[in-house]
Image (cartoon, grey):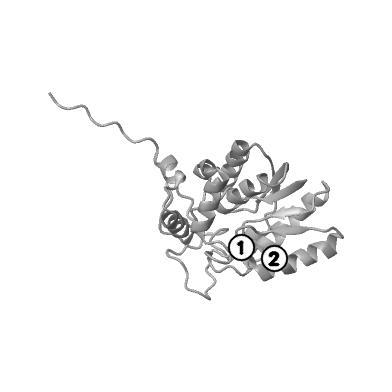
Amino acid sequence: MSAVVLFSGGQDSTTCLAWAQARWSNVQCVAIDYGQRHIIELDCARKVATAAGVNLAIVPCDSLRALGGSSLTGTLTVPSGVPAAGIIPNTFVPGRNLMFLTIAAAFAFQRGITELVTGVCQTDFSGYPDCRADTMTALQAALRAGMDSPFTIHTPLMFLTKAQSVLLMRELGRLDLLALTHTCYNGKIPPCGICPACLLRAKGFAEAGLADPLIAASLGPAEPPAAPSR
């Protein structure tokens, strides 16, 4: 059995990759080059895919940058803090998950694959409507009808908190992969620590009682203690 993981090089899609590898013998990843503000996402996607031993296809789709309206594709300032419930922040890229999963499905169709995996989540998330379960149910039906193929969209993180997703990665024995990921909306290394993505990630690791391997990796090795003066 085979599966295609919609991949960004971030924490959630990397967790989904580990989850998929525990279930299917052949897992392939698709990342989308959509003119995102921080190309580091694709660099991290390549590093994680190599470390996980999977094939990664990077598909160009720059229409979202041309449409604008998001701080992830243009010059708008990324807001700090987690947005209040019911407010869609300017980090939302309208139509992104709908387009990306359609591309992933087309990629899978050409290879006779029907299992699609994505890291969308409506528990600890930034208020994006295209991350919700009802969106995925509707999209799955549309993909099945539009390509006449029995696609299944798997969303293993849909109802997990960030802490639970961290613990899932520990259970899968792949916390090491998270050291290679990128989450920061500001594209910072080490992470900025104040954007919504950084705050949600930090909250998840804190509640799970585990250290984030990305922080240790991005800060580099500790300096050795200075030799005592004579």
For the point 47% across and 61% down, which residue is it? Answer: 196
Q: CA distance from mark 2 to mark 1?
A: 10 Å
For the point 70% across and 63% down, which residue is it? Answer: 98
For the point 45% across and 66% down, which residue is it? Answer: 82
Q: Nearer the viewer, mark 2 or mark 1?
A: 1
Specify the label residue 158 is tagged with: 1
Taking 15 as reference, is 147 above or below it? below
Question: Mark 1 is on which residue type?
Answer: Met
Total marks shown come to 2
> Reading the chain from its start, which is encountered first: label 2 or label 1?
2
**Horizontal and vertical percent for residue 191?**
43, 50
**Horizontal and vertical percent for residue 159?**
59, 64
**Horizontal and vertical percent for residue 101?**
71, 58
- Element assignment for label 2: helix
Q: Is there any visible trace of residue 58 in the rendered image?
A: no
Specify the label residue 66 is tagged with: none
